[in-house]
Amino acid sequence: MSFNIDLSYIRSVIIKLLPPTAQLTRLEFEGPEIAVYVRNPQFLLDQGDIASHIAKLIKKRIVIRTDPSIRKPEKEVREYLKNLVPPEAGVESIEFDEVLGEVVIKAKNPQIIEAKAKQILVHTGWRPKVIRAPPMRSKIFEEIIHGYLANSDYRLRFLRSLGEAIHRDVLLAKNGNNFTRVTFLGAAQEVGRSAILVETAESKLLLDFGLNPGRGLLSNAFPRIDLLGIDPEDLDAVIVTHAHLDHAGLVPYLFKYGFKGAVYMTEATRDLTTLLLKDFLEIAEREGSEPPFTLADVEKMLLHTITLKYNVVTDIAPDIRLTLYNAGHILGSAIVHLHIGNGFHNIVYTGDVKFGKTRLLDRADYEFPRVDTLIMESTYGATEQPKREEAENQLLKIILDTYNRRGKVLIPTLSVGRAQEIMVILADAMRQGRLPKMSVYIEGMIHEVTAIHTSYPELLSKELGKRLKNDENPFDFETFIRVEGREPRTEIVESSEPAIIIATSGMLTGGPAVEYFKLMAPNPNNAMVFVNYQVEGTLGRRIRDGAREIAFVNEKGKVEIIRIKMEVYSIEGFSGHSDKTQLLDYIKHMQPKPSKIVLVHGEKNAILNLSREIERKKRYLGIGDAIVLVPNLLDSYTLAYNI
Ligand SMILES: [Zn+2]
């Protein structure tokens, strides 16, 4: 069994296959990739596929870099690009990363420049890195890109040391000794603080590391890694399935306690997570509570983040390969596939998964090269959701009724995903005349998230992706108004015009939605519509469950009672989660079939119900004698061993 391919083998393959004219100067590990430095990249034009041929042989991704001596001066490169790139590419900015030898080009149509990438590298000595300039500007995206440019030195040092760590010599696993053990640090018979520790003979990693939004900052809002005596410094990696805080919210906290490894996620998840973490810090500051990490920890997380595309296999530890698949839940959300010990064990972890098409995304992927254990979410393990169409009609009817009595509709939403889904529905309904044209106020944070959506058309549903690429912005309409700052809120609520307000947070745990709620609740002409799951312990859940008097401590420290006279609705059908039927369908469609199914991320009732259903329908689901497990908090399962 050949485990790891070391650098000397890689070197011998590259020296043999690379034409001598390339003038190889050095090879470096660069995170999971191998950087090949050459003095003459001309071979890329003459023998185009040689790099991918080498990559196939050594089973590593390679990146061709240039020796600094051949890089042309910046001015000359700008001039060259001006002549080479046609205006329809829509170049917005050109920046240089001296450390990596990259020219970072931001353009409206990146594919036009990507088609000329080799040519640019050969003629300028700079490797082009092309970034999409979205129709809506995302502040956070620009901040991230500039953070990388400004810390290029640190980033390169980190990537090299990560490369050494990923390719370190394996001891036990080399002799066929291995085990796979998982421990559930959170999301065990609860929704919130998703975190799973995966241990093998050689490596340790975390799948998600989130917080429980219903529990403030109490210690039981955290995954209890502390109780196991695991030192964050000993972890190889954290894999983040998606940007929601119950999955990603405490990753920076690991850095505060010495984590030095890599964080893997999709590019969209990186942007969205950064935005949500910064917002979390701002809210904590405003409320005077002490957050569990600082902005510096978030920035460190970014410098340790490796972004991956769906369906690309990546080495992340000496005995673990990672592949991300579309999870259909929110933009950039991923199903994790872990290939451990050359096929010794294979885990699929769904994160949050939608096995059904939404306005935003195509349904989750369900075919994998190998599967032994499936770890699946169970949020709606006991519930069926109404059809999406019905949910949309219900929403439009509530809006229309409220409009007719000249009231306002508050839609508290998660800033990521649901808000954009609702925006597309409202924009299309007004475009098609199914709703009268009316003002839709969108809070700043949601606007920013929407901008990130427009940056990744390839991650959106085929239909939305196509509309975006055709220069249409499906997230916008002439009556949509972006709200900046807090002042306009009272004015919006007090105006006599009917209107719709989309604001965070979706569970009324804070943010502008709570401010609007306080202002709008006393007026019976108004309506509030919940369009997402309400976690136990949140204000949203209490109101959804019937509370009609809410006590708040106001700015003067006095208790203030709000009586809810506005109408309150909850529409289930918009969920980014699969309902019971879709979860069962997912198992039925999954290829190949798992021999163990572990259920997580559901309240006790939902998870136990789903477990019973799976047991009952084993034959229908085609899973034979598969074992179904429902872990308690801190339960560990040894999924496979040979020791
Ligand atoms: Zn989620």
Image (cartoon, helix red, strand yellow):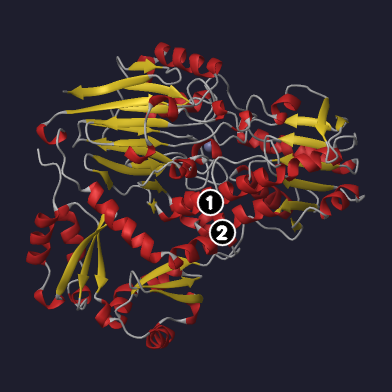
Along the line of sight, which residue is nearer the eye, 528 or 294? 294
Against 26, residue 519 (above or below) is above
Relative to 564, say whether 634 is above or below. Answer: above
Q: Which mark is residue 140?
A: 2
Pointers 1 and 2 in contact (CB under 8 A)? yes
The local crowd at label 1, few if under 14, some if 14 to 19, many if 20 or more residues have their Cα within 10 Å, is many
Can you identify the residue that label 1 sits on? 274
User: In which image quadrant can residue 138 be found?
Assistant: bottom right
> Where is the N terminus found, in terms of image quarters?
top left
- What residue is rendered at 51% in x and 70% in y? 108
- Mark count: 2
Q: Residue at x 18, y 55 (%)?
A: 56
Image vertical order of residue 433 relative to residue 3, above or below: below
Q: Kindly report the distance in space between the C-alpha atoms of the residues bearing marks 1 and 2.
A: 8 Å
| Precedes in sequence: disc 1 or disc 2 | 2
Picture residue at 17% right of the left edge, 68% below the top: 26
